[in-house]
Amino acid sequence: MPTTAPSDPVQGLAAYSEVTASEASLRRFLHGLPGVDQVGAEARATGLGTRSIKTTSKAWALDLAIRMVDLTTLEGQDTPGKVRALASKALRPDPADPGCPSVAAVCVYGDMVGEVKAVVGDRVNVAAVATAFPSGRASMAIKLADTRDAVAAGADEIDMVIDRGAFLAGHYLQVFEEIVAVRDACARPDGSHAHLKVIFETGELQTYDNVRRASWLAMLAGSDFIKTSTGKVQPAATLPVTLVMLEAVRDFREATGVQIGVKPAGGIRTAKDAIKYLVMVNEIAGDDWLDPDWFRFGASTLLNDLLMQRTKMTTGRYSGPDYFTLD
Amino acid sequence: MAFEYAPAPESRSIVDIKASYGLFIDGDFVDGHGSSFKTINPATEETLAEIAEASDADVDLAVKAARRAFRGWSRMSGKERAKYLFRIARIIQERGRELAVLESIDNGKPIKESRDVDVPIVAAHFFYYAGWADKLEHAGLGANPQPLGVAGQVIPWNFPLLMLAWKIAPALACGNTVVLKPAETTPLTALLFAEICQQADLPPGVVNIVTGAGSTGQALVGHSDVDKVAFTGSTGVGKAIARAIAGTDKKATLELGGKAANIVFDDAPIDQAIEGIVGGIFFNQGHVCCAGSRLLVQESVADEVLSRLKRRMGTLRVGDPLDKNTDIGAINSREQLDRIRELAGIGEEEGAERWAPECDLPSSGFWFPPTIFTGVTQAHRIAREEVFGPVLSVLTFRTPAEAVEKANNTPYGLSAGVWTEKGSLILHMANELRAGVVWANTFNKFDPASPFGGYKESGYGREGGRQGLAAYLKAEEA
Amino acid sequence: MARIDVRKTYKLYIGGAFPRSESGHSYEVTDSLGKFVANAALASRKDVRDAVVAARKAFGGWSARTAYNRGQVLYRIAEVMEDRRPQFEEAVKQSEGGTAAAARAQVDAAVDRLVWYAGWADKLAQVVGNANPVAGPFFNHSAPEPTGLVGVLAPQSSSLLGLVSVVAPVVVTGNTAVVVSSYDRPLPAVTFAEVLATSDVPGGVINILTGDAAALGPWLAAHMDVNAIDLAGVAGSTELATSLEVAAADNLKRVRRAPAAEPDWSADPGIGAMTAFVETKTVWHPIGI
């Protein structure tokens, strides 16, 4: 692959049009990507986890992490009341501190988009999971209807799942075409389109080689973000999985000029973990990605820990969970 | 705003460095009969302590103490010797942070390495050989193998405490007693280890530490009552030792220089290979005998590997060894810095292209930025001589046969690296490479259970593992 | 009238061929009573040089043979020796004196020793190599490999059993050898070379020079393309042995030191003669998916 980014992303992408022209060529391309050695990748992730950052950077990093949170509830028991409470929290995570930033988005099932929108308006994005989340086991027609429904309800972002069965069976072109179709379904009448995040469910893909292949496949299909997990399968996001995806977006931009975002989701619960992820973003992809437009945390409990650490930074003493809202 | 890392310095207060140190002979610290020298912090050039230089007479006292102690130590049952070694291992773990900080102060290596690599492996080494002490009859060296006697051990400055462990742990487990000379520039952790021997109530004379420079080492190696010589250091000194013990009954283990090839094929796991290249040459400032100092990269991926390598090198942090975020610490001595500068200068004069990322180096202390040379051929001195610093020579190859030929085209044979996803190619390369350690899809890994040592002019004998016992035992005489 | 003997002038064995000494010199070999037996080539330093070149050239192929195949080749040497027992017995008796029974016993022991070493070819790695349980997700294993090219100063007294006892362990492990035979008792070595030439040993794997260990040893010990040296042939010559060891240090040859006196070669040899000329290679690889 080329090592300097093409100046024109359209041309950059066009150079890869042949890759996705057939099942055989796509397969050849994905299997021609450099392998990932598990032990080495995990050692690198662990090494990055030992970096420590200074006080002023830490305050900035905590606020950045809050701004990157996709505050999530994806439960069968979700109600309008629960979702509205979460949306309020997304707007004002720390009611005691007006200086505390809002999160990036609220992430809900498609039928709850309107409830969130009613609370947050345009101040926080609304992300909807779609395409028969979390398993992805439904007909294409249902997946597309699911997507269009959420977009019509006002979703700013669509978090779709790939068909892991098809991917693991080696039907890469089928997965590719599904992503392309969902992306088309994200279009709005005004010509804009909801941002598309593509969830791999890396816990089911199992190997880092598969994660790297899925990353390239999704990026070539036009996803705006690549996302690790639904949160419904263990393991969800891990540092090394995110490392492999960050390498993929870094390499993809070098190859095509197109920048893609990354979203680890599920299992990130502490501010300490979040900062490890940010260190990794900084060292692997670079500081262009240190922005809510390019990196998100799919999380629920993480937010309160970030808030507690943030309070510790300002007050100098450790806080407790009673001082933060549980929604 | 961009991310800024610490300074996140490890506290120095955990170590208590005395103003001066004597020699550790027969269980006590004693004044030497020779002069003294200073050991300094290479990151700041501050004097850390005054160290006694052992004279020939001091060395003789130490050897005599070891000889006296040998009788009791070698006749002690293995299971009792084992308990002393287990004690030492445990104390090393307990005092791990102290040892790591002291090592970084005296040596210049990043605390991240002394804390996460050196000291844990030191403890593991004592645990490993402690377990052997009462199982020697199962080591494949005869039914009732016997210790050799007094071991004279001379170690280098690049891994002061780790090399001490590699020398002392197997020697003691096998029932030998030792006189060890640490390197002139890095004596402090060996002297702290002497305190640990006291703390463990190790019988006096079993371990003796004599500090000094080359002449002290010569006196030790040449002492007529030394039965075994173990040396880690330069090939030049190794040869001198081999000559010095010619015609004697002394057994020798020599662990010497290297000029390892780190071979990257076009189907390598590229991101891990980059990490392996970086870890291979910049770990411990490149002060590593098995460092992957020659990168052999297949031509078809050479540009990509180089561009990724340079990008990665841009994220390396050079500076205060005690800062937990430091990747590359201080060069150990001015002498070594001068040597690195000289060879790097020769690299440029011979037409290789030099590159280093921009990095701010501290104004005092000894520093050299991570550096690569491209356009290097086998004829360049930087491709043949051991630089022993953070300097990588990059060469290319086209076929596996060419890679093997270039990799083996050196008088050294300590280690080699291979990066490819093709299993049969890994095993082929592992067979063909004339080196004592072959790391495939990894590099610079060490473990007490894993034998380490070289082919050809990288020395002889093995340290670590079951094989490491052979260096300190002989078959029972009929 | 008695038949006139055809007197032989023996040659060197280098690279599978039988050249005369490059120097053209030969020396008279006498039996144990001092009676002329034959002329043997007197190897020179240039013959050492040529033999080293031949042994180096043979190393790649020989060390790459399967262990099983090396064992077969050694066993084949034993088979051919067995066929020529009378010739070896005569050579030993002529060289060393003593009884026919003693000569026969030595030949028996020499053939048996070759068979013994032949069987080691595919076992030594199992006995001295092993898996290493390192504290991490790595496959790690150590195995012996041949050191390379070994110079062998063969014993001066034991002309056949001694010779076989120092040569077999060197080559069975995959090394190649440049051998300097006993000076006074070279005939069994010469006969051994003829056996090698008619067995399956590739040319250059074993090279045999007849001549003076004191004259050739220094060239072999100092040669920078020789990886190791066995000083058995200078047993008891402390000063010479020391000087050879000093010369060997120039490229850190592995040295099997000269014993104070020539040992009893009929004793159980153990595996020490093999492990003296192997290198332990340790290979690491990550374990993952």
Image: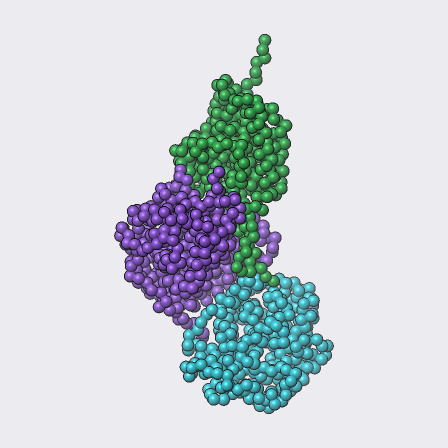
Residue beneath the point at 49% across and 28% down? C157
Residue at 48% in and 60% down: B279
Q: Percent from the top left, x then y, of residue C227?
A: 48, 41
Residue A158, placed above or below residue B93: below
Chain B as rendered: colour? purple
Location of the C terminus of chain A (image quadrant):
bottom right
Q: Is residue B340 above or below residue B456?
A: below
Residue found at x 47% / y 51%? B78
B86 relative to A39 in the view: left or right: left
Q: Does the image show residue A243?
A: yes
Spot occupied by residue C53 in the image (x, y as percentages of width and height): 51, 37
Say which residue appears at 41% left-offset and 31% top-offset.
C237
Q: In the rendered image, which quarter is residue C106 located in? A: top right
Judging from the image, what is the letter of the chain drawn in green?
Answer: C
Q: Quadrant of residue B352?
A: bottom left
In the rendered image, residue B132, in percent from the top left (x then y), is placed at 49, 52
Chain displayed in cyan: A
Q: Judge from the rendering whether residue A273 lies leftward or rightward of residue C68; answer left or right.
A: left
Is A256 above or below relative to B82? Answer: below
Q: How is the image coloured?
A: by chain
Q: Is residue C94 above or below residue C276?
A: above
Closer-to-camera residue (B204/B330): B204
| Residue B464 shown left or right of residue B38 in the figure | right
Which residue is nearer to you in this view: C235 or A20? Answer: C235
